[in-house]
Amino acid sequence: MQQLPSGDVMYRAVANRDRSFEGVFFVAVRTTGVFCRPGCPARTPLRANVEFFGTVSGCLHAGYRPCRRCHPLEPAARPPDWVERARRLAEQHVDRRLVAGDLRAANIDPVRAARYFKTHYGMTFQAYHRAYRMGLALRGIRAGATVGAAADATGYESESGFRSAFVAVFGGPPTVVAGGATGDLRARWLPTPLGPMLAIASGEGIVLLEFVDRRGLPAELAALRRETGGAIVPGDSDHLDRLAEWLDRYFAGAAADVDVPIAVRGSPFRRSVWSQLLDIPAGQTRSYAELAATIGAPRAARAVARANGANRISLLVPCHRVVGSDGSPTGYGGGLWRKRWLLEHERRHWAAATPAVRTA
Protein backbone atom coordinates (compact mmCIF):
# COMPACT_ATOMS: atom_id res chain seq x y z
CA MET A 1 0.00 0.00 0.00
CA GLN A 2 1.47 3.35 -1.03
CA GLN A 3 1.51 6.65 0.77
CA LEU A 4 -1.46 8.90 -0.09
CA PRO A 5 -0.74 11.35 -2.91
CA SER A 6 -0.79 15.08 -2.22
CA GLY A 7 -4.13 16.86 -1.87
CA ASP A 8 -3.68 18.60 -5.20
CA VAL A 9 -2.99 15.32 -6.98
CA MET A 10 -6.02 13.67 -5.42
CA TYR A 11 -8.32 16.58 -6.22
CA ARG A 12 -7.11 16.60 -9.83
CA ALA A 13 -7.91 12.87 -10.00
CA VAL A 14 -11.42 13.58 -8.72
CA ALA A 15 -11.92 16.43 -11.21
CA ASN A 16 -10.77 14.17 -14.06
CA ARG A 17 -12.75 11.16 -12.73
CA ASP A 18 -9.50 9.25 -12.91
CA ARG A 19 -10.32 5.64 -12.08
CA SER A 20 -6.65 4.69 -11.90
CA PHE A 21 -6.79 6.02 -8.32
CA GLU A 22 -9.51 3.53 -7.33
CA GLY A 23 -8.53 1.90 -4.05
CA VAL A 24 -5.87 4.53 -3.29
CA PHE A 25 -8.13 7.04 -1.55
CA PHE A 26 -11.71 8.17 -0.95
CA VAL A 27 -12.99 11.73 -1.34
CA ALA A 28 -15.52 13.10 1.17
CA VAL A 29 -17.70 16.15 0.50
CA ARG A 30 -18.46 18.30 3.53
CA THR A 31 -21.53 19.99 2.01
CA THR A 32 -23.34 16.72 1.25
CA GLY A 33 -21.93 14.45 3.95
CA VAL A 34 -21.11 11.81 1.31
CA PHE A 35 -17.86 10.01 0.47
CA CYS A 36 -17.04 8.71 -3.01
CA ARG A 37 -14.58 6.88 -5.20
CA PRO A 38 -12.13 9.09 -7.15
CA GLY A 39 -13.98 8.29 -10.40
CA CYS A 40 -17.48 9.07 -9.16
CA PRO A 41 -19.66 10.45 -12.01
CA ALA A 42 -21.27 13.06 -9.74
CA ARG A 43 -20.49 16.75 -10.28
CA THR A 44 -17.01 17.71 -9.07
CA PRO A 45 -17.20 19.47 -5.68
CA LEU A 46 -15.22 22.60 -4.86
CA ARG A 47 -11.74 21.97 -3.54
CA ALA A 48 -12.54 23.76 -0.28
CA ASN A 49 -15.43 21.38 0.38
CA VAL A 50 -13.55 18.09 0.23
CA GLU A 51 -11.25 16.03 2.38
CA PHE A 52 -9.49 12.78 1.63
CA PHE A 53 -9.23 9.48 3.49
CA GLY A 54 -7.31 6.28 2.92
CA THR A 55 -9.93 3.96 4.42
CA VAL A 56 -13.67 3.44 4.62
CA SER A 57 -13.41 3.44 8.42
CA GLY A 58 -11.88 6.92 8.37
CA CYS A 59 -14.78 8.24 6.28
CA LEU A 60 -17.41 6.70 8.54
CA HIS A 61 -15.79 7.92 11.74
CA ALA A 62 -15.71 11.42 10.28
CA GLY A 63 -19.48 11.28 9.85
CA TYR A 64 -19.77 10.62 6.10
CA ARG A 65 -22.11 8.16 4.37
CA PRO A 66 -21.32 6.20 1.19
CA CYS A 67 -22.34 7.63 -2.18
CA ARG A 68 -25.18 5.77 -3.88
CA ARG A 69 -23.86 6.54 -7.35
CA CYS A 70 -20.32 5.17 -7.17
CA HIS A 71 -20.77 2.73 -4.23
CA PRO A 72 -17.37 3.28 -2.55
CA LEU A 73 -17.91 0.43 -0.10
CA GLU A 74 -18.00 -2.13 -2.85
CA PRO A 75 -14.53 -3.10 -4.14
CA ALA A 76 -15.72 -3.93 -7.64
CA ALA A 77 -19.30 -4.47 -8.74
CA ARG A 78 -22.49 -3.04 -7.34
CA PRO A 79 -23.34 -4.66 -3.98
CA PRO A 80 -26.25 -7.07 -3.65
CA ASP A 81 -29.61 -5.41 -3.12
CA TRP A 82 -29.85 -6.61 0.48
CA VAL A 83 -26.53 -4.90 1.31
CA GLU A 84 -27.87 -1.62 -0.02
CA ARG A 85 -31.00 -2.11 2.10
CA ALA A 86 -28.87 -2.75 5.17
CA ARG A 87 -26.85 0.43 4.62
CA ARG A 88 -30.01 2.49 4.13
CA LEU A 89 -31.42 0.98 7.30
CA ALA A 90 -28.31 2.13 9.17
CA GLU A 91 -28.58 5.65 7.77
CA GLN A 92 -32.30 5.94 8.46
CA HIS A 93 -32.01 4.90 12.10
CA VAL A 94 -29.25 6.99 13.63
CA ASP A 95 -31.53 7.63 16.60
CA ARG A 96 -31.33 4.09 17.98
CA ARG A 97 -29.35 0.88 18.02
CA LEU A 98 -30.34 -1.70 15.41
CA VAL A 99 -30.72 -5.33 16.48
CA ALA A 100 -31.07 -8.63 14.65
CA GLY A 101 -34.85 -8.29 14.62
CA ASP A 102 -34.60 -5.05 12.66
CA LEU A 103 -32.56 -6.79 9.99
CA ARG A 104 -34.95 -9.72 9.79
CA ALA A 105 -37.89 -7.31 9.46
CA ALA A 106 -36.12 -5.88 6.39
CA ASN A 107 -35.68 -9.44 5.02
CA ILE A 108 -31.93 -9.41 5.79
CA ASP A 109 -30.23 -12.39 7.45
CA PRO A 110 -28.24 -10.99 10.44
CA VAL A 111 -25.54 -13.67 10.21
CA ARG A 112 -25.07 -13.08 6.49
CA ALA A 113 -24.90 -9.33 7.09
CA ALA A 114 -22.27 -9.74 9.80
CA ARG A 115 -20.08 -11.90 7.57
CA TYR A 116 -20.44 -9.72 4.47
CA PHE A 117 -19.69 -6.44 6.26
CA LYS A 118 -16.74 -7.97 8.12
CA THR A 119 -15.27 -9.43 4.92
CA HIS A 120 -15.77 -6.41 2.67
CA TYR A 121 -15.61 -3.45 5.04
CA GLY A 122 -13.51 -4.72 7.93
CA MET A 123 -16.31 -4.34 10.51
CA THR A 124 -19.58 -6.01 11.41
CA PHE A 125 -22.89 -4.42 10.47
CA GLN A 126 -23.41 -3.35 14.08
CA ALA A 127 -19.93 -1.77 14.14
CA TYR A 128 -20.70 -0.02 10.85
CA HIS A 129 -23.92 1.41 12.30
CA ARG A 130 -22.19 2.46 15.53
CA ALA A 131 -19.34 4.13 13.63
CA TYR A 132 -21.83 6.00 11.47
CA ARG A 133 -23.85 7.21 14.49
CA MET A 134 -20.76 8.27 16.44
CA GLY A 135 -19.30 9.98 13.36
CA LEU A 136 -22.44 12.10 13.04
CA ALA A 137 -22.31 12.85 16.76
CA LEU A 138 -18.70 13.97 16.51
CA ARG A 139 -19.51 16.27 13.60
CA GLY A 140 -22.40 17.74 15.59
CA ILE A 141 -20.27 18.42 18.66
CA ARG A 142 -17.57 20.03 16.55
CA ALA A 143 -20.27 22.21 14.98
CA GLY A 144 -21.34 23.46 18.41
CA ALA A 145 -23.89 20.93 19.66
CA THR A 146 -23.77 19.95 23.33
CA VAL A 147 -22.93 16.41 24.38
CA GLY A 148 -26.53 16.05 25.57
CA ALA A 149 -27.90 17.12 22.20
CA ALA A 150 -25.60 14.70 20.40
CA ALA A 151 -26.73 11.91 22.73
CA ASP A 152 -30.38 12.72 22.02
CA ALA A 153 -29.80 12.84 18.25
CA THR A 154 -28.23 9.39 18.27
CA GLY A 155 -30.92 7.85 20.48
CA TYR A 156 -29.12 7.45 23.78
CA GLU A 157 -31.31 7.71 26.85
CA SER A 158 -28.48 8.97 29.03
CA GLU A 159 -25.33 10.99 28.51
CA SER A 160 -23.35 8.36 30.39
CA GLY A 161 -24.39 5.67 27.90
CA PHE A 162 -23.51 7.95 25.00
CA ARG A 163 -20.12 8.79 26.49
CA SER A 164 -19.32 5.11 26.96
CA ALA A 165 -20.19 4.35 23.33
CA PHE A 166 -18.19 7.36 22.16
CA VAL A 167 -15.12 6.28 24.12
CA ALA A 168 -15.45 2.74 22.73
CA VAL A 169 -15.26 4.12 19.16
CA PHE A 170 -12.81 7.01 19.51
CA GLY A 171 -10.81 6.08 22.59
CA GLY A 172 -11.59 9.29 24.48
CA PRO A 173 -14.49 11.37 25.82
CA PRO A 174 -16.46 13.64 23.45
CA THR A 175 -15.13 16.97 24.72
CA VAL A 176 -11.51 15.82 24.45
CA VAL A 177 -11.79 14.22 21.02
CA ALA A 178 -14.03 16.89 19.49
CA GLY A 179 -12.19 19.84 20.94
CA GLY A 180 -8.67 18.57 20.42
CA ALA A 181 -7.96 19.21 24.09
CA THR A 182 -4.96 17.70 25.78
CA GLY A 183 -5.39 13.98 26.32
CA ASP A 184 -3.19 11.50 28.14
CA LEU A 185 -2.10 9.77 24.92
CA ARG A 186 -2.09 11.39 21.48
CA ALA A 187 -2.62 9.22 18.41
CA ARG A 188 -1.98 9.82 14.71
CA TRP A 189 -2.13 7.69 11.56
CA LEU A 190 1.06 8.05 9.54
CA PRO A 191 1.26 6.90 5.89
CA THR A 192 4.27 4.87 4.77
CA PRO A 193 5.19 3.00 1.58
CA LEU A 194 4.42 -0.24 3.44
CA GLY A 195 0.97 0.83 4.59
CA PRO A 196 -0.34 3.18 7.30
CA MET A 197 1.02 3.04 10.82
CA LEU A 198 -0.58 4.06 14.10
CA ALA A 199 1.62 6.22 16.31
CA ILE A 200 0.82 7.06 19.94
CA ALA A 201 2.76 9.44 22.15
CA SER A 202 2.71 10.30 25.83
CA GLY A 203 4.30 13.39 27.30
CA GLU A 204 7.55 11.44 27.59
CA GLY A 205 7.80 10.12 24.05
CA ILE A 206 6.52 7.55 21.56
CA VAL A 207 4.83 4.62 23.30
CA LEU A 208 3.52 2.76 20.24
CA LEU A 209 4.25 2.58 16.52
CA GLU A 210 2.63 -0.31 14.65
CA PHE A 211 1.27 -1.11 11.20
CA VAL A 212 -2.49 -0.77 11.47
CA ASP A 213 -3.17 -4.24 10.05
CA ARG A 214 -1.12 -5.96 12.76
CA ARG A 215 -3.33 -8.68 14.19
CA GLY A 216 -2.31 -8.00 17.79
CA LEU A 217 -2.86 -4.23 17.65
CA PRO A 218 -6.25 -4.16 19.47
CA ALA A 219 -4.75 -6.11 22.38
CA GLU A 220 -1.78 -3.76 22.49
CA LEU A 221 -4.07 -0.73 22.63
CA ALA A 222 -6.13 -2.28 25.42
CA ALA A 223 -2.99 -3.07 27.40
CA LEU A 224 -1.67 0.44 26.88
CA ARG A 225 -4.90 1.94 28.23
CA ARG A 226 -4.74 -0.33 31.28
CA GLU A 227 -1.11 0.49 31.99
CA THR A 228 -1.44 4.24 31.64
CA GLY A 229 -5.01 4.74 32.80
CA GLY A 230 -5.39 7.32 30.04
CA ALA A 231 -7.51 7.78 26.95
CA ILE A 232 -6.06 7.43 23.47
CA VAL A 233 -7.29 10.40 21.45
CA PRO A 234 -6.47 11.85 18.03
CA GLY A 235 -4.15 14.82 18.46
CA ASP A 236 -0.84 16.51 17.86
CA SER A 237 2.42 16.56 19.77
CA ASP A 238 6.04 17.46 19.16
CA HIS A 239 6.93 13.79 19.52
CA LEU A 240 4.53 12.79 16.73
CA ASP A 241 5.84 15.60 14.52
CA ARG A 242 9.40 14.38 15.05
CA LEU A 243 8.36 10.81 14.34
CA ALA A 244 6.64 11.81 11.08
CA GLU A 245 9.84 13.53 9.96
CA TRP A 246 11.92 10.51 11.01
CA LEU A 247 9.72 8.14 9.01
CA ASP A 248 9.87 10.35 5.92
CA ARG A 249 13.66 10.34 6.06
CA TYR A 250 13.88 6.64 6.87
CA PHE A 251 11.76 5.51 3.94
CA ALA A 252 13.58 7.94 1.65
CA GLY A 253 16.82 6.22 2.57
CA ALA A 254 18.25 9.40 4.10
CA ALA A 255 20.16 9.65 7.35
CA ALA A 256 17.53 9.36 10.08
CA ASP A 257 19.19 11.93 12.32
CA VAL A 258 15.98 13.26 13.90
CA ASP A 259 15.90 12.79 17.66
CA VAL A 260 12.72 10.88 18.55
CA PRO A 261 12.16 10.24 22.27
CA ILE A 262 10.60 6.89 23.12
CA ALA A 263 8.99 5.72 26.35
CA VAL A 264 9.16 1.95 26.65
CA ARG A 265 7.10 -0.04 29.14
CA GLY A 266 8.04 -3.52 30.25
CA SER A 267 9.87 -5.77 32.67
CA PRO A 268 13.60 -5.24 33.33
CA PHE A 269 14.36 -8.28 31.14
CA ARG A 270 12.35 -6.98 28.21
CA ARG A 271 13.84 -3.51 28.57
CA SER A 272 17.33 -5.03 28.47
CA VAL A 273 16.46 -6.81 25.21
CA TRP A 274 14.97 -3.67 23.66
CA SER A 275 18.03 -1.68 24.71
CA GLN A 276 20.20 -4.10 22.73
CA LEU A 277 17.95 -3.71 19.70
CA LEU A 278 18.77 0.00 19.65
CA ASP A 279 22.45 -0.89 19.25
CA ILE A 280 21.97 -2.91 16.05
CA PRO A 281 23.08 -0.65 13.17
CA ALA A 282 20.82 -0.23 10.18
CA GLY A 283 21.77 -2.68 7.46
CA GLN A 284 22.92 -5.31 9.98
CA THR A 285 21.18 -8.13 11.85
CA ARG A 286 21.59 -10.17 15.03
CA SER A 287 20.25 -13.60 15.90
CA TYR A 288 18.13 -14.28 18.98
CA ALA A 289 21.01 -16.38 20.38
CA GLU A 290 23.45 -13.51 19.88
CA LEU A 291 21.15 -11.12 21.71
CA ALA A 292 20.72 -13.58 24.55
CA ALA A 293 24.48 -13.88 24.92
CA THR A 294 24.88 -10.09 24.81
CA ILE A 295 22.55 -9.57 27.79
CA GLY A 296 24.30 -12.33 29.75
CA ALA A 297 21.57 -14.97 29.37
CA PRO A 298 22.87 -17.38 26.69
CA ARG A 299 20.14 -19.96 27.44
CA ALA A 300 17.32 -17.43 27.08
CA ALA A 301 17.02 -17.24 23.28
CA ARG A 302 13.33 -18.11 23.40
CA ALA A 303 12.65 -15.51 26.09
CA VAL A 304 14.52 -13.00 23.96
CA ALA A 305 12.30 -13.90 21.00
CA ARG A 306 9.19 -13.32 23.13
CA ALA A 307 10.53 -9.97 24.30
CA ASN A 308 11.31 -9.05 20.72
CA GLY A 309 7.73 -9.87 19.72
CA ALA A 310 6.37 -7.79 22.61
CA ASN A 311 8.01 -4.62 21.30
CA ARG A 312 5.32 -2.03 20.55
CA ILE A 313 7.56 0.57 18.91
CA SER A 314 8.35 -0.81 15.47
CA LEU A 315 11.20 0.61 13.37
CA LEU A 316 12.39 2.98 16.12
CA VAL A 317 13.14 -0.04 18.28
CA PRO A 318 14.28 -2.20 15.35
CA CYS A 319 13.01 -5.66 16.22
CA HIS A 320 12.97 -6.37 12.47
CA ARG A 321 16.78 -6.63 12.61
CA VAL A 322 16.64 -9.84 14.62
CA VAL A 323 16.74 -13.04 12.54
CA GLY A 324 17.02 -16.78 12.97
CA SER A 325 20.33 -18.53 13.62
CA ASP A 326 20.59 -19.34 9.91
CA GLY A 327 20.08 -15.68 8.97
CA SER A 328 16.52 -16.11 7.71
CA PRO A 329 13.81 -13.57 8.64
CA THR A 330 11.43 -15.02 11.21
CA GLY A 331 8.57 -13.89 13.41
CA TYR A 332 7.53 -10.32 12.60
CA GLY A 333 4.14 -8.99 13.72
CA GLY A 334 3.96 -6.64 10.74
CA GLY A 335 4.35 -9.55 8.33
CA LEU A 336 7.47 -11.31 7.02
CA TRP A 337 7.11 -9.55 3.66
CA ARG A 338 7.59 -6.22 5.46
CA LYS A 339 10.54 -7.54 7.43
CA ARG A 340 12.28 -8.65 4.23
CA TRP A 341 11.53 -5.28 2.61
CA LEU A 342 12.89 -3.33 5.60
CA LEU A 343 16.11 -5.33 5.78
CA GLU A 344 16.73 -4.98 2.05
CA HIS A 345 15.89 -1.26 2.22
CA GLU A 346 18.44 -0.74 4.99
CA ARG A 347 21.14 -2.77 3.26
CA ARG A 348 20.59 -0.76 0.10
CA HIS A 349 20.70 2.70 1.63
CA TRP A 350 22.99 2.52 4.64
CA ALA A 351 24.92 -0.08 6.52
CA ALA A 352 26.27 1.55 9.64
CA ALA A 353 23.85 4.25 10.78
CA THR A 354 21.81 3.79 13.92
CA PRO A 355 18.63 5.89 14.03
CA ALA A 356 18.74 8.68 16.60
CA VAL A 357 16.40 7.38 19.26
CA ARG A 358 16.35 8.42 22.90
CA THR A 359 14.70 6.29 25.59
CA ALA A 360 12.70 8.43 27.98
Image: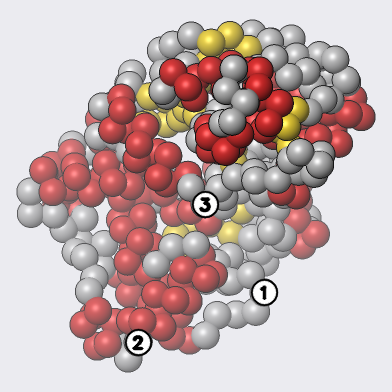
Instruction: Give the mark, 3 or 2, whose residue is nearer the N terminus.
Output: 2
Q: Which residue lies most toward the left here?
A: 158
Q: Residues within 10 Å of mark 1 (few under 14, many from 20)?
A: few
Nearer the observer, 61 or 112: 112
Please identify the quarter of the rendering in which residue 300 is found. top right
- Residue topped by disc 3: 215
Task: Describe the element under mark 1 as helix, strand or loop.
Answer: loop
- Residue topped by disc 1: 76
Nearer the observer, 267 or 252: 267
Q: Position of residue 241 (x, y in %)?
A: 58, 17
As drawn, 109 above or below 193: below
Q: Amino acid at mark 3?
A: Arg
Dots 3, 1 in contact, CB < 8 A: no
- Residue topped by disc 2: 109
Whether residue 68 sits left or right of residue 342 in the image: it is: left
Nearer the observer, 63 or 127: 127
As drawn, 191 above or below 155: above
Instruction: Give the mark, 3 or 1, whose residue is nearer the N terminus.
Output: 1
Q: Position of residue 163 (x, y in %)?
A: 19, 42
Q: Position of residue 59 (x, y in %)?
A: 49, 51
Q: Amino acid at mark 2?
A: Asp
Residue under the point 28% across and 46% down: 168
